[in-house]
Image: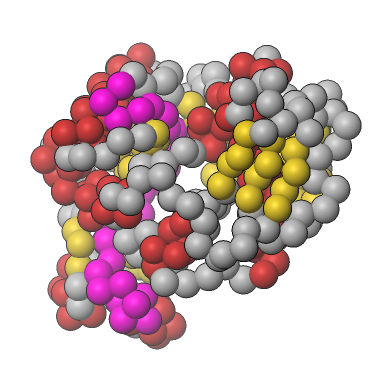
Amino acid sequence: MFEIYANLDQEERWLGTRLVPHVAKRVSAMSTLLAALAPEAEEVTIYALAPVADVVPTTWVLPRVEARVPASWDLVWCEPSARAFNDRRYALALGQELGCALPRAAALTTLEAIDAHVGEGPWVLKAPWSSAGRHRVHGVGRLFGEHRVAAQRLLERTGALTYEPWCDRICDVGVCGVAGGEVTEPHEIVNGPRGNFLGIELRPEVLAVGEHDQLVITAERVAQRLYDDGYRGPFGIDAFVHRVDGERVLHPLCEINARYTFGHVARALGERFGARRLEFGRHPPGGSRLLVHAEGIKAWVV
């Protein structure tokens, strides 16, 4: 029996919060996809956050998957130092060192510092740990009204927020790897307009040759730096291509996820099923292979 501890709420616990019940159920349903990381000959037990019923249809050809709720809310975490390496301030500092941080990106610790820093255009403030577009404040120009209240609440909880200009994105991309080891080919991250995660395209055609090479080189540097700084384990980086004065520009290091990511999962599913894309939503297209159908969410590969 191969056991997987599905820490898909890890960022929430680092932040000192919990997922609301309906989100915990949805995350638990999605966590059954982690069975793709197990050896093919093994039956799999996945320890999830909430009960999961009827998640795996007959089209899921891996060995039987059993989802269990752990006895304790805190699931096992294999790398105690991962909290520091998932902190957005670590990624920001490394991006500044590598010369690829966004202009004016900064870690800010007070509302007064935010007031002094925001520009005229759109921006986003992010908590040090979050996923799926949660714990962010979007605004344009001066910080006021409900945005100011939301930023103050996040600051009180976290002590710091990272400020970034909101860019005119063309596409979101990422790379998976292992600290101190090899990195994979880039993949496209399919996101909604506010950064909510919708899927992974394994064979993206969105990157120019120079952008591809720059992204891979950045991922290799991150892999080595994580290892040098003491992290051992899987990681992924997020990046994006955006427009600056009408020209394409790659931002090669938006975030570091020092853990398994859905990029790893999509690649494992691709190897098993010959799939090119992992998607989440409500309406799978014709010809897709349905993998999850539970708690108001479906997942499939095509």
Name the quadrant of the C terminus.
top right
Residue 179 versus residue 79 in the image, above or below: above
Magenta stretch encompasses residue 254 = no
What's the residue at 54%, 52% (across, down)?
8
Residue 149 versus residue 47 in the image, above or below: below
Q: Between 245 and 242, which is closer to the camera in this rendering?
A: 242
Name the quadrant of the N terminus.
top right
In the displayed structure image, the side of residue 173 where residue 221 appears, left or right: left
Residue closest to the far right = 58
**Residue 120 shows in the view:** no
In the displayed structure image, the side of residue 191 where residue 22 appears, left or right: right
**Residue 260 shows in the view:** yes
> Percent position (x, y) of residue 295?
78, 57
Among the 4 quarters of the image, the one containing residue 88: bottom left
> Percent position (x, y) of residue 16?
41, 72
- Range covered by the magenta-colored residues: 153-181
Q: Between 269 and 95, which is closer to the camera in this rendering?
A: 269
Magenta stretch encompasses residue 165 = yes
